[in-house]
């Protein structure tokens, strides 16, 4: 397997590019801008989520998880969306330790999604 083949597999596992690009009318430049905005916004939401969870502000934590879920769905980051949804639904019902584990998993998955976005944009610019 070549490096580019491996990169494509990583991208496909973490991003739904085809559908997202179709929603944008095939505009790859717009997709790159969407990814850039997500990369700036998601860490801020994650910080707010972590603070809300640490402070026991479950309504705010649920709100931030919901916001991350929606943003991840918009960019096609499906695994991130699924984790955010699990956290949104579980923050009130799960023990704090399990919610924190989900949040940590979401942080890691978002980093993987960011890398996949970089690979997708890089491949499109070749």
Image (cartoon, grey):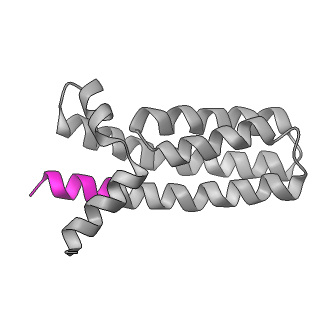
Residue 78 vertical placement versus 108 (above, below) = above
Which quadrant of the rendered structure holds the C terminus?
Answer: bottom left
Quadrant of residue 90 within the rendered picture: top right
Horizontal side of 99 relative to 84 (left or right) equals right
Where is residue 91? Give x, y as percent.
81, 42
Give the position of the N terminus as an image quadrant: bottom left
The answer to which of 29 and 79 lies nearer the viewer is 79
In the rendered image, which quarter is residue 76 located in? top left
Q: Is residue 102 magenta?
A: no
Q: Position of residue 110 (x, y in %)?
A: 51, 55
Work out whether residue 70 or residue 38 is closer to the camera in this orientation and state it: 70
How many circles with numbers are drawn on the protein?
0
Q: Is residue 60 left or right of residue 40?
A: right
Q: Residue at x 18, y 32 (%)?
A: 27
Q: Nearer the viewer, residue 82 or 68?
A: 82
Residue in the image at 12% along x and 53% along y: 125
Q: Residue at x 46, y 61 (%)?
A: 112
Q: Residue furthest front?
A: 1
- The x, y position of residue 124, in whole percent, is 15, 51
Q: As drawn, is 69 to the left or to the right of 50? A: left
Q: Name the magenta segment's main secondary structure.
A: helix
Q: Quadrant of residue 75?
A: top left
Q: Which residues are magenta?
A: 117-126
Left or right, 92 with reference to 40: right
Q: Is residue 121 magenta?
A: yes
């Amino acid at each position: 397997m070549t490096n580019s083949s491996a990169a494509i597999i990583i991208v496909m596992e973490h991003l739904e590019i085809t559908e997202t690009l179709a929603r944008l009318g095939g505009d790859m430049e717009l997709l790159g801008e969407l990814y850039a905005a997500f990369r700036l916004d998601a860490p801020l939401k994650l910080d707010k989520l972590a603070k809300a969870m640490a402070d026991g502000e479950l309504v705010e934590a649920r709100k931030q998880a919901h916001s991350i879920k929606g943003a991840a769905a918009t960019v096609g980051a499906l695994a991130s969306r699924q984790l955010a949804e699990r956290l949104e639904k579980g923050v009130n019902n799960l023990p704090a330790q399990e919610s924190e584990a989900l949040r940590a998993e979401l942080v890691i998955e978002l980093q993987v999604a960011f890398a996949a976005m970089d690979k997708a944009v890089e491949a499109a610019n070749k």
